[in-house]
Image (tube, rainbow, N blue to C red):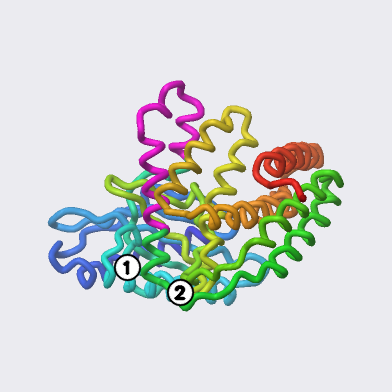
Amino acid sequence: MAENGIDQIATEIRSRASEWYPERGESKSVRVVGHTPRPDHYIYDLVLDFAAGSERLAVKLHRAGKAGVAAARRVAAAENEHLTAMWRVAQARELAGIPRPLGDFSALGAVVSEKLVGTPLQSIIMKAALLPGYADMGTLQSAARASGEWLRSLQRITAQPPKPLDATRLHMEIERLCHCCRAEGLDDASIRKILSGTHVILERARSPRTNSAVLHEFAPLNVVVLETGVGFCEFARLEEDGSPYTDPATFLAWVEALEKYPFCNHAITTEVQRNFLDAYGASAPEREILRVVQMKVLLSMFAAGRTVKESPARKKVMWANVMKKFIQTAADRSLPEAV
């Protein structure tokens, strides 16, 4: 079904190419040069050839799944709307790094845009972890700083009226997640540490912060490092008016979670987090709240567990053991003791 879908999309792209790129002349061909399967969608890399050059496109084709074709079309329509809205805001406010949407392919369950040509930040982190000396070259640090600057700029141009932090609700969500993780093996001592530490921080959180657009998937795997700066192209879960702590905390949590790989040490993840936060411009009180929201994201990862159907029980047990130890370590080094 996916192969038939991309063929149909490629045919439509070729017929409309001259509308999008009139300066390129007549379109000659559309080539699929790669694809990446994801649990709920495919990412296709296309090259659109013209008489005068070529353009790179990205096609996100949603899987029908159990919910059916209609659900895939709805998801694609919502994502296309989000991408178009964010691209227009970014163009008006001169923020680079958001791909230009091309047409509306939601009837085919797809989102088509120009491709951001670069390297995922996660790949750079892994390269730094595996190759001795690579982390000292400055590439990793500059990419982390560019990520922080870009996210703060996005929040600035999508700013909404300030809203107070709902500390009670946040603490209740963390408590619920802790109980879910207990079933996966998280011990009572770690749970007490997490709940007491978050309580201490939230008790002194008073100042409201300006809300903004929330991406919900601002993770190293989705941040593309370009020749100049960074970019982002996952807008399926975009929220126009949400907490400004969600995206930076998500980024910090996913960076820290890379430590579950034995070759990715704490020194590298700490360097990425430090450069990100410095460029993001987080104040001392903001960093405290971010530690709490970061812990919430980590607990959500642990509670979700491994969702791959083919994973045998032994791998699920290994995942639980690794994440249990990881959560314990994260709580010990980032949350204060109750006083």
Is 157 drawn above or below residue 288 in the view shown?
A: below
**Percent position of residue 153, x then y:** 37, 61
Residue 230: x and y, percent?
35, 51
Q: At which x and y percent is residue 160?
A: 45, 76
Circle number at residue 18: none
Quadrant assignment, res 80: bottom left
Closest to the observer, 65 or 273 = 273
Which residue type carries mark 2? Answer: Ser
Q: Count the numbered circles shown.
A: 2
Q: What range of the chain is rendered magenta?
A: 123-151
> How many residues crowd around disc 2 within 10 Å: few (fewer than 14), some, or many (20 or more)?
many
Q: Is residue 130 magenta?
A: yes
Quarter the N terminus occupies: bottom right
Q: Residue at x 43, y 45 (%)?
A: 120
Query: On screen, 325 above or below 150?
Result: above
Question: Is 278 on the left or on the right of 248, as rendered?
Answer: left
Q: Residue at x 58, y 77 (%)?
A: 70
> Residue beneath label 2, please?
106
For badge 1, the amino acid type reads Ala
Q: Is residue 109 visible?
A: no
Is residue 315 inside the magenta stretch?
Answer: no
Q: Of callouts 2 and 1, which one flags the residue occurring earlier in the amino acid sequence?
A: 1
**Disc marking residue 90:** 1
Closer-to-camera residue (59/229) = 229
334 with respect to 234 (left or right): right
Residue that extends furthest to the top in the rendered view of this protein: 132
